[in-house]
Image (cartoon, rainbow, N blue to C red):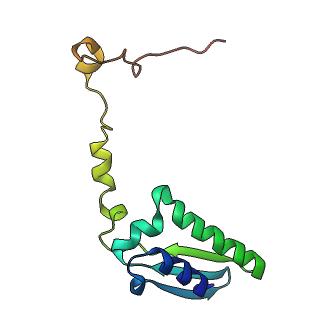
Amino acid sequence: MKDLVEYIVKSLVTKPDGVSVEETNSEEGVNLLLKVDPEDMGLVIGKAGQTIKAIRRLVLIRAMADNIRVNLELNDPEGGRRSGNQEESNESEGTEEPKDEEIENPEKAEDAEEPKAEETVEPEK
């Protein structure tokens, strides 16, 4: 199984020497830890995770044929985007609650819609 993952990933990345797969056996089955060069991480993950999902699907098909259980994990390198920048991205997305002035006077903003956060609707009985 390790050889299959290495073959697929080395075919995708720009630095195949940076690819390694660690295989460990446990009671649950085989655990594979995939490590790639940080510059190739985006290629391995793919848009919306499609590439790594496809790799996992291929591994699953092979595991089913061999009647074993396999878990493929992608090692997140230190300083990776997912580890430290999640808080920053939440702040930049405008997740703050609206200020009272914005709710009471929506006509101050040019493109403001009616505030829906303050509306209360009682359920019918």
> Which quadrant does the C terminus fall into?
top right
Q: Nearer the viewer, residue 34 or 19?
A: 19
Residue 79 x/y as whole percent: 29, 70
> Which quadrant does the N terminus fall into?
bottom right
Quadrant in the rendering for residue 81:
bottom left
Q: Is residue 62 above or below residue 49?
A: below
Q: Nearer the viewer, residue 87 or 53?
A: 53
Viewer can see residue 67: no
Q: Nearer the viewer, residue 115 or 72?
A: 72
Does 27 sit left or right of 112 as displayed?
right
Residue 90 x/y as whole percent: 32, 46
Does 105 sit left or right of 55 as displayed?
left
Viewer can see residue 65: yes
Q: Is residue 26 above or below residue 89?
A: below
Image point (41%, 78%), residue name? 36
Circle count: 0
Image point (70%, 77%), residue name? 62
Q: Nearer the viewer, residue 97 or 54?
A: 54
Image point (55%, 78%), residue name? 8
Image point (30%, 36%), residue name? 96
